[in-house]
């Protein structure tokens, strides 16, 4: 299995300016989000990792080197990172076309490694993670369910559904689904009207157009995680999520941990 981490964005909604680094370099408990990602993936046997970079790519490269992952982590630069995340995923199309199962992940997520246990241990070949504890509004990407099937996947759903939960932003894709996603992302990136959209859009197209049951979900409600988009997300990560993380010694070597939630 190969992993793709999307880490190219500038984090404008977080208030990041040129003096700041990518969100993946935010620190919690003495570790950057990127370090947590790489350690968790290694603990689950995933060492073929691609990270799409753009904004302050030099800082991400420095962090990968500091962590000793330069031999297993490939940085894929997206010079058009300001245009939207679909272009960042397009930059990683060679990985999607590799013929291997793919783990696609947002890099700006602080999470307990038990989410990875659920995702990789699922019997569902094309699996999304869903949390029923969702904040109302248009910001969260919603996984909409009817009869235990995903019937929509969008911030503003358009299909009929029974209930929904928030998408964590982690996806496990079979080789054929990853290959199809590459083709769809290429279509988006080559279309000036769709190039600026988020990478979830082509995934939604696949879900809506696939046979029932091709895509499924695991419910991780109750496990701690947060996607960091706004300053209040950083505070929530520091004050609520980080204290609830279960950091196992097998994954995270011992060190003095403090919820620093800060700087680059």
Image: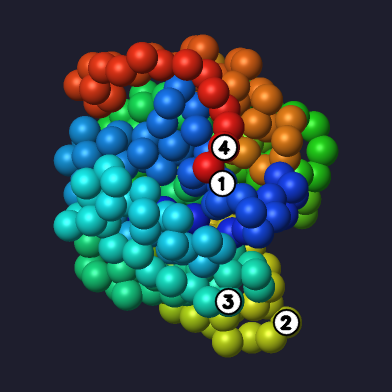
* Residue matched to label 4: 263
* Chain-order first, disc 3 or disc 1: 1
The image quarter in which residue 50 lies: bottom left
- Checking the image for residue 23, the label placed there is 1
Look at discs 4 and 3 and give the one toward the viewer: 4
How far is disc 1 from disc 4 in space, using C-alphas? 10 Å
* Chain-order first, disc 2 or disc 4: 2
Look at discs 1 and 4 and give the one toward the viewer: 4
- Checking the image for residue 193, the label placed there is 2
How far is disc 2 from disc 3 in space, using C-alphas? 15 Å
The residue at 31%/68% (across/down) is 95
How far is disc 2 from disc 1 in space, using C-alphas? 27 Å
Which secondary structure lies at badge 1?
helix
* Chain-order first, disc 2 or disc 1: 1
Q: In this view, does 226 lie above or below 87?
A: above
> x and y percent of residue 63 in the render?
37, 49
Residue neighbourhood size for the residue with mark 2, other residues' Cα within 10 Å, grouped as few (<14), some (14–19), many (≥20): few
- Checking the image for residue 80, the label placed there is 3
Q: In this view, does 32 lie above or below 152?
A: above
How far is disc 3 from disc 1 in space, using C-alphas? 17 Å
> x and y percent of residue 44 in the render?
22, 36
View extreme (front): residue: 19
Which secondary structure lies at badge 2?
loop
Which secondary structure lies at badge 4?
loop
């Amino acid at each position: 299995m190969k992993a793709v981490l999307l880490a190219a964005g500038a984090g404008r909604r977080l208030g990041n300016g040129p003096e700041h680094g990518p969100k993946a370099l935010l620190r919690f408990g003495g570790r950057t989000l990127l370090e947590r990602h790489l350690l968790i993936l290694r603990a689950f046997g995933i060492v073929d990792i691609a990270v799409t970079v753009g904004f302050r790519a030099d800082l991400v490269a420095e962090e990968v080197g500091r962590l000793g992952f330069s031999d297993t982590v490939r940085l894929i630069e997206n010079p058009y990172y300001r245009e939207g995340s679909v272009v960042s995923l397009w930059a990683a199309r060679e990985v999607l076309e590799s013929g291997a199962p793919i783990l696609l992940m947002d890099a700006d997520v602080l999470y307990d490694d038990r989410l990875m246990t659920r995702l990789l241990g699922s019997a569902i070949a094309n699996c999304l993670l869903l949390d029923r504890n969702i904040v109302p509004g248009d910001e969260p990407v919603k996984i909409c369910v009817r009869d235990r099937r995903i019937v929509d996947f969008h911030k503003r759903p358009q299909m009929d559904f029974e209930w929904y939960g928030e998408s964590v932003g982690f996806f496990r894709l079979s080789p054929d689904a990853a290959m199809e996603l590459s083709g769809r992302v290429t279509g988006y990136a080559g279309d000036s009207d769709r190039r600026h959209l988020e990478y979830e859009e082509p995934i939604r197209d696949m879900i809506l157009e696939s046979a029932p049951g091709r895509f499924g979900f695991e419910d991780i409600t109750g496990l701690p995680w947060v996607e960091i988009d706004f300053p209040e997300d950083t505070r929530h990560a520091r004050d609520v999520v980080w204290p609830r993380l279960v950091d196992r010694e097998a994954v995270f070597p011992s060190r003095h941990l403090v919820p620093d939630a800060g700087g680059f």
